[in-house]
Image (spheres, rainbow, N blue to C red):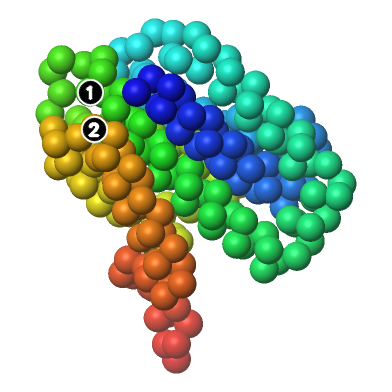
Amino acid sequence: MEIFIMVLEIIGTIAFAVSGALTGMKKNMDIFGVIILAETTAVGGGIMRDLILGLNPPGTFANPVFAITATATAIITFLPMIRRVLVKNRKIYEIVMLVMDSLGLGIFTVVGIQTAYTVSSRYNIFLLIFVGVITGVGGGVLRDVLAGDTPYIFVKHIYACASIAGAVVCILLWKINSTLAILIGSSVIIVIRFLAAFFRWSLPKANIFDHEKQLP
């Protein structure tokens, strides 16, 4: 189980690091800024999770393999030949961002739940869902704030709601089989994200300023 979780975390780290690096390059940041954004996206949610669960120091600092992986991923993504393909072509950029962000969200949500089950003896459903979601979305929120954007989860498609749905599925299946729960829970999140992007599902918005523009 430990090896399985480790592999999932490495995959999620790479996915989120790519999304962070792409955001940095889109903002025309230098290599240092790109690495920082990749690191923040990849490990930010995990640090929040560990602080909530009372793990000190957070696992990112106790085991730097994930930070190293994120840095290496950012450097590779920054290479000119890869940068030209991923950033200059808007369609490819959007597809890669969707896939990487969805993959990272799905993996880190269920990994957050697994961590809560492992280290806490006083967990309840609210804690499990909250920790799972904060692990999944936390890094992306920090990425967007550092990049000067409104956090993605507040304005784009179905994002945090997909994380919540996958977290609930994971928790419901956990006592049956934890490995199955992790796989199905993360898959639910990824599928919802893809469907939301394809069908342009979004939560209701106030659209106050659009209404004001129509007033005489």
Which corner quadrant of the image does residue 111 belong to? top left
Which element is circle 1 on?
Answer: helix
Q: Secondary structure at mark 2?
A: helix
Instruction: Please determine whether, in this image, residue 185 is positioned above or below residue 1.
Output: below
Q: Is residue 73 visible?
A: yes
* Spot occupied by residue 10 in the image (x, y as percentages of width and height): 53, 30
Above or below residue 21? Residue 128 is above
Residue neighbourhood size for the residue with mark 2, other residues' Cα within 10 Å, grouped as few (<14), some (14–19), many (≥20): some
Task: Name the mark on residue 205.
Answer: none
1 and 2 marks in contact (CB < 8 Å): yes
- Is label 1 or label 2 in front? 2
Residue at 41% x, 28% y is: 4
Q: Position of residue 101 (x, y in %)?
A: 51, 49
Name the one closer to the observer, 156 or 166: 166
Reading the image, the residue beneath label 2 is 178
Left/right of residue 214 with respect to residue 100 in the rendered view? left
Q: Amino acid at mark 2?
A: Ser
Could you give the CA–CA distance between mark 1 and mark 2, rounded to whole angstroms? Answer: 10 Å
Which residue carries the number 1 mark? 117
Would residue 185 appear left or right of 17 to someone viewing this image? left
Dot 1 alpha-carbon crowd within 10 angstroms: few under 14, some 14 to 19, many 20 or more: some
